[in-house]
Amino acid sequence: MKSTLYVSAVAFGLAGVFAASAAEARDTIQIAGSSTVLPFASIVAEEFGNFFPEFNTPVVGSGGSGGGLRQFCEGVGENTIDIANSSRQIREAEIEVCNRNGVSDIREVMFGYDGIVFATRTDRGSFELTPEDVYRAIGAHGEDGPNTATNWNEISENHPDQRIMMAIPASNHGTREVFEEAVVLPGCQAVHGEDAEDEMCLELRQDVIIEIVGDYTETLARLNADNDAMGVFGLSFFDQNRDTLQVATVNGVEPTLETIAQGEYPVSRPLYFYVKGEHIGVIPGIEEYVEFFMSEGVNGPGGVLEAAGLIPAPREEIEANLEEFRSGGAAN
């Protein structure tokens, strides 16, 4: 995904005009996007404000990976964000939208890893899931017609006699894409065969799922309101709420920092943020923010982000990503 993007002098000229007006109007970094990345970016923004009093504390919002990248690609200037947080890589179609709107210097920074977990309340039964179990519970198509299962013990006798109800991220979240690719599609293929069409596999039962458009606090509220509900979100959010929640194993592996870092837990993904190169040197502090985010004390073993639930990338990978950022390497 990384290579240098070349754009016309006209595009850069327009970007410069917009950037100049941004410099006059705004001196605070604006960030939006992934609910998974939100707590990490919020911690970094607060620490950044404390360590660098010459810069304003960045403003960090949510909206999901897709929502953040849409805002990021709206253009260059004071009314557009500087950084988009994402729990997936930017798509080619999104890059094309960015380019059409004058955003051509898109700098990708991969900063660590996270796992997607299946959580239930601690006062309910525990689960040992497989992708096939999840698909048999929420997939629209059973082997002999529409899926009508109502309780988990109908899926497997090893599961609790508990009503099927799952709160999953809506399509504006990068977590949804990983959930579909790492869980729903392989689960569907286990039921319907490897030639099963993706479109059919991704049809989910509307009677047993709740699509969460907001952040993970909305998922938690659903679990608090419905004793039987199972929530799908990042490991880092579970770590903040492990006093009231428990997580399922997937393919016999418990999601932990260690199993994700070692590649044993099957539902994990890298995390990213995207920097608008046209705003570097215009909005104060962007380069310093990136360097601070990727510093060993913040984003390394024993750093503040690991304490918050991030699985740090190997240091050599972090340094390579930083060098790509510094050299102006861009998403392509």
Image (cartoon, grey):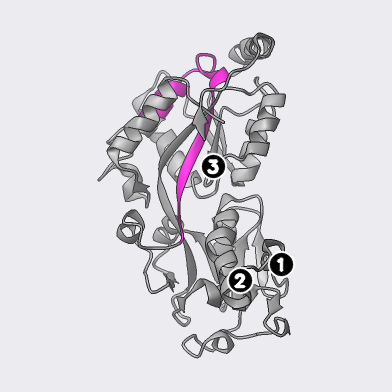
Q: Mark 2 is on which residue type?
A: Cys
Q: Is residue 275 magenta?
A: yes
Tell me the CA gap for discs 2 and 3.
24 Å
Check whether the beta carbons of the residues at disc 3 and disc 1 lie within 8 A of each other.
no
Q: Mark 3: which amino acid? A: Gln
Q: Which mark is residue 20?
A: none
- Front-lying residue, 241 or 198: 198
Tag of residue 188 = 2
Name the spot of residue 24 as percent of width and height, x first.
61, 11
Q: CA distance from mark 3 to mark 1?
A: 24 Å
Residue 307 picture location, percent across and down = 32, 49
Give the SS element for disc 1: helix
Determine which residue is flagged by label 1: 200
Decide which of tag 3 and tag 1 comes sooner along the chain: 3
The residue that appears at 53% across and 39% down in the rendered structure is 85
Tell me the crowding category of disc 3: few under 14, some 14 to 19, or many 20 or more residues within 10 angstroms, Cα based: many
Q: Which stretch appears magenta?
A: 267-291
Mark toward the viewer: 3 or 1: 1
